[in-house]
Image (cartoon, grey):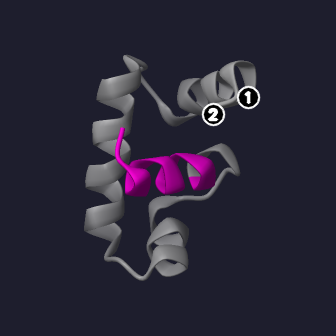
Amino acid sequence: MTAREREVLKLVAEGRNNKEIAAALFISPKTASVHVSNILAKLNVSGRTQAAALVLREGL
């Protein structure tokens, strides 16, 4: 996972949506969405909630 994806994952775990992630990282909402999709695929999870739970459980 890239450094940027780890940043996005942290924000996902905080419960932020793509628009909020985009604003926090100065990227477009579409770019935030692509990052989230890539993260979900890399973690082999089907949604943001599962990704957030994995972060909390595994300390990613």
Position of 23 with respect to 38 (left or right) is right
Position of 15 with respect to 18 (left or right) is right
Image quadrant in which the C terminus is located: top right
Amino acid identity at mark 2:
Ala
Residue count near mark 1 (Cα–Cα under 10 Å), binned few <14, some 14–19, many ≥20: few
In the image, residue 27 above or below residue 60: below
Could you say which quadrant of the image residue 17 lies in? bottom right
Residue beneath disc 1: 56
Position of 3 with respect to 15 (left or right) is left
Q: Nearer the viewer, residue 47 or 56?
A: 56
Residue count near mark 2 (Cα–Cα under 10 Å), binned few <14, some 14–19, many ≥20: many
Could you say which quadrant of the image residue 28 lies in? bottom left
Q: Is residue 51 magenta?
A: no
Secondary structure beneath label 2: helix
Asked whether the beta carbons under mark 1 and mark 2 sit within 8 Å of each other, the answer is yes
Which residue is rendered at x = 35% and y = 70% of the image? 29
Residue 38 position within the rendered picture, expressed as x and y whole percent measured from the top left: 28, 39
Count of labels shown? Answer: 2
Q: Is residue 10 magenta?
A: yes
Residue beneath disc 2: 52
For the magenta stretch, what is the residue range? 1-11
Residue 19 position within the rendered picture, expressed as x and y whole percent measured from the top left: 47, 70
Could you say which quadrant of the image residue 46 lies in? top left
Which residue is rendered at x = 40% and y = 49% of the image? 5
Residue 28: mark:
none
Residue 18 position within the rendered picture, expressed as x and y whole percent measured from the top left: 45, 61
Secondary structure beneath label 1: helix
Q: CA distance from mark 1 to mark 2?
A: 6 Å
Position of 18 with respect to 56 (left or right) is left
Question: Mainly helix, strand or loop, the magenta region?
Answer: helix
Amino acid identity at mark 1:
Leu
In the image, residue 12 above or below residue 23: above
